[in-house]
Image: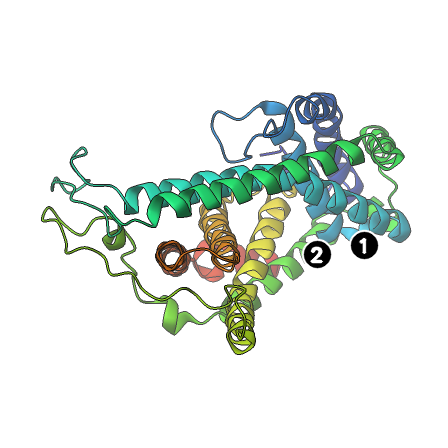
Amino acid sequence: MTDAPMTTSAATVTAGEVLSRYLNEQAGLFLRALPQAVGEAGARPGALPSLNSPTGSAGTGDLLRSVRRIGGALHTFGAVFEPGWAHESRTELRWLLNLLAQEPAYLRRSARLLAALDTLSSTGGGPLGAAGESRGPGMLAGHPGAPKARALLDRQLTLARTRVHSSVLQELRSSRLHALADRMTLLVGEAPVVAAAGSAAGEVLLPQAAVAFAALGQAVQALPWQRAATAYQGDALHRLGAVAPAPAPVAAPLPAQGRSGATGATGAAGDADGALAADDAPWHRTRILVKRARYALEVCGRPGGELDALDQVLDRHQEAADAAVTVATAARTPRITPATAYVLGVVHADQRLEVEAARYAFGRQWPTLPQHGWHEWASA
């Protein structure tokens, strides 16, 4: 966390000095990580690491972290900067973030889905579980559609990742990236701030941080807490017990397989996808607001461990929701067998259980602002 003088001498240090210190550090990290990240992208498809992977390369991870923090600071404390410059900078940072985050996201999604399918189709005999019980077979153990479903997911995700990789390479050679690097060089020197930045940091930054926390609080209050209060045991799908279950039935394929006369089914599938997207949207929005609140605390030199944990939970929520969308898309591949569609349906349900489990965990961890002193601080 960035050292900020607001905690000790907010009356003497200006808002511009606090923000400049924070942005100088992040812009320097950006410029140091950029050449390495570009080199990683040019190596081979799949070279861009997962930001959350402990074994990932430092270049892209550091670059993504700096982009998110600079963008968050410019959004929360935008009134301190020249409006046109701040808006253009946020737009360009968002472009780079979306560009670089795609390939690592596909890598994580592939690992998540293939691992889920492997445990669901496992025949058991592995190490003991967390509670000490023996691990039995998965729900899809011995199912004829499991190998085909795995191959289909692997093929589609690899193709998507390769396409994204080619797009990233093209964009990283563009003048747009060089212009953004020039903007970051400006931040290393002196950020373009307005006259208000010369006022005391506490008087300028704390009210703007309060707006970020108010937006987060309102978003959380609007979440469907009654539904999220139930714990979902998604692991039960993976391990049914030590006794082998009866052979899994082969069900009808999921809707919209591309056969003739499937117009009604296609419409129903689209309605289902839309309903799930609408259900996930407020949680995805809350995830963005949690990140902005985290970065506001960093700028102001305040501890934010609770928000770090909440951010990780909502990251898991996003990953599981995106994985479920990928499986639903794969299940509509034309001419796949009913057995393959059945397996994909089970994997889709498994990922949706992961979504609900993340919501439950968020509800258990969400701290009310007054309990942690954030409300009093933000209202000061």
Residue 81 at x, y = what percent? 84, 48
Q: Amino acid at mark 2?
A: Gln
The residue pinned by badge 1 equals: 79
- Is 259 located above or below residue 184 in the figure? below
Q: Alpha-carbon neighbours of circle 2 within 10 Å: few (<14), some, or many (≥20)?
A: many
Q: Is residue 94 left or right of residue 160?
A: right
Residue 53 at x, y = what percent? 49, 32
Residue displayed at 50% across by 74% down = 265
Looking at the image, can residue 4 be seen?
no
Residue 203 at x, y = what percent? 73, 53
What colour scheme was applied to this rendering of the protein?
rainbow
Q: Amino acid at mark 1?
A: Ala
The number of numbered discs placed on residues in the rendered structure image is: 2
Q: Is residue 252 left or right of residue 213?
A: left
Separation of marks 2 and 1 at Cα, in angstroms: 8 Å
Residue 19, by quadrant, is: top right
The residue pinned by badge 2 equals: 208
Do the numbered discs 2 and 1 sit on residues whose CB atoms are within 8 Å?
yes
Residue displayed at 47% across by 54% down = 327
